[in-house]
């Protein structure tokens, strides 16, 4: 996918379902939650005007970055533009099927995540497929012309 295509996707998208946002582990320092990659990316995208739905079946009902955590994509009533995935590659075909059922526009697999089966499911459902790219890094690079070395450590 070209830079222009990614830029258009980010420009024309308003809603993101973020699968794999981290919940607070028992006894964990709350400050650690703010540093987890999915949570950092969620907060960043919220700061740039995106409505982000955190998805984590093990944290359903918790509040993360001001949003109530949902158990699955099925719990979202409005149209989801981007399904952004922070889960292991082997889990992505199932997520791709859920995204296709919700008629999402884009299946976005974060840095280090890719799966041929998920790509085929997305393409068969006329969804754009982006893998092995961080949505936050791409936003920074394409709109802010910034390219931090350790983007998950920046806020």
Image (spheres, helix red, strand yellow):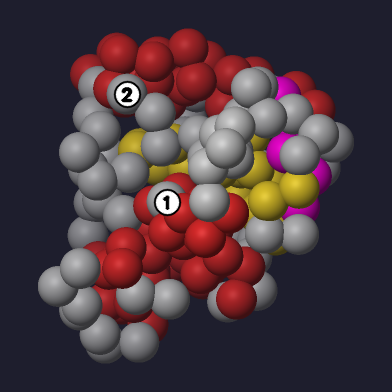
154, 128: nearer the viewer = 154
* Disc number placed over residue 36 in the picture, else none: 1
Whole-number angstrom distance, CA of label 2 to CA of label 1: 15 Å
Q: Quadrant of the C terminus?
A: bottom left
Q: Main secondary structure of the magenta part?
A: loop
Marks 2 and 1 in Cβ contact (< 8 Å)? no
- Sooner in the amino-acid sequence: mark 2 or mark 1: 1
Relative to 103, is 42 above or below? below
**Image quarter for residue 42?**
bottom right
Q: Is residue 111 left or right of residue 128?
A: left
> Crowdedness of circle 1 by 10 Å Cα count: few (<14), some, many (20+)?
some
Mark 2, residue position: 88
Q: Residue furthest right?
A: 77
Residue 150 visible in the displayed image: yes
Relative to 36, is 11 above or below? below
The kind of secondary structure element at disc 2 is loop
Relative to 66, is 117 above or below? above
> Crowdedness of circle 2 by 10 Å Cα count: few (<14), some, many (20+)?
some
Q: Is residue 126 left or right of residue 113?
A: right
Count of numbered circles on the image:
2
Does the stretch in magenta take in 126? no
Residue at (23%, 19%) from the top-left corner? 116
**Image quarter for residue 62?**
top right
Q: Position of residue 109 (x, y in %)?
A: 35, 38
Q: Position of residue 10 (x, y in %)?
A: 47, 64
The kind of secondary structure element at disc 1 is loop
**Image quarter for residue 102?**
top right
78, 49: nearer the viewer = 49
Span of residues in magenta? 67-71
Residue at (65%, 74%) from the top-left corner? 49
């Amino acid at each position: 996918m070209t830079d222009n295509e990614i830029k258009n996707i980010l420009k024309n998208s308003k809603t993101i379902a973020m699968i794999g946002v981290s919940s607070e582990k028992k006894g964990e320092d709350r400050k650690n939650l703010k540093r987890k990659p999915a949570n950092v990316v969620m907060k960043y995208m919220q700061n740039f005007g995106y409505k982000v739905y955190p998805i984590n079946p093990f944290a359903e009902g918790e509040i993360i970055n001001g949003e109530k955590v949902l158990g699955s994509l099925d719990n979202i009533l409005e149209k989801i533009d981007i399904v952004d995935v922070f889960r292991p590659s082997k889990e992505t075909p199932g997520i791709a099927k859920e995204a296709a059922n919700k008629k999402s526009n884009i299946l976005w697999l974060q840095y280090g995540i890719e799966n041929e089966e998920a790509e085929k499911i997305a393409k068969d459902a006329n969804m754009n497929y982006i893998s092995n790219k961080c949505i936050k890094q791409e936003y920074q690079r394409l709109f802010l012309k910034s390219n931090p070395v350790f983007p998950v450590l920046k806020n």
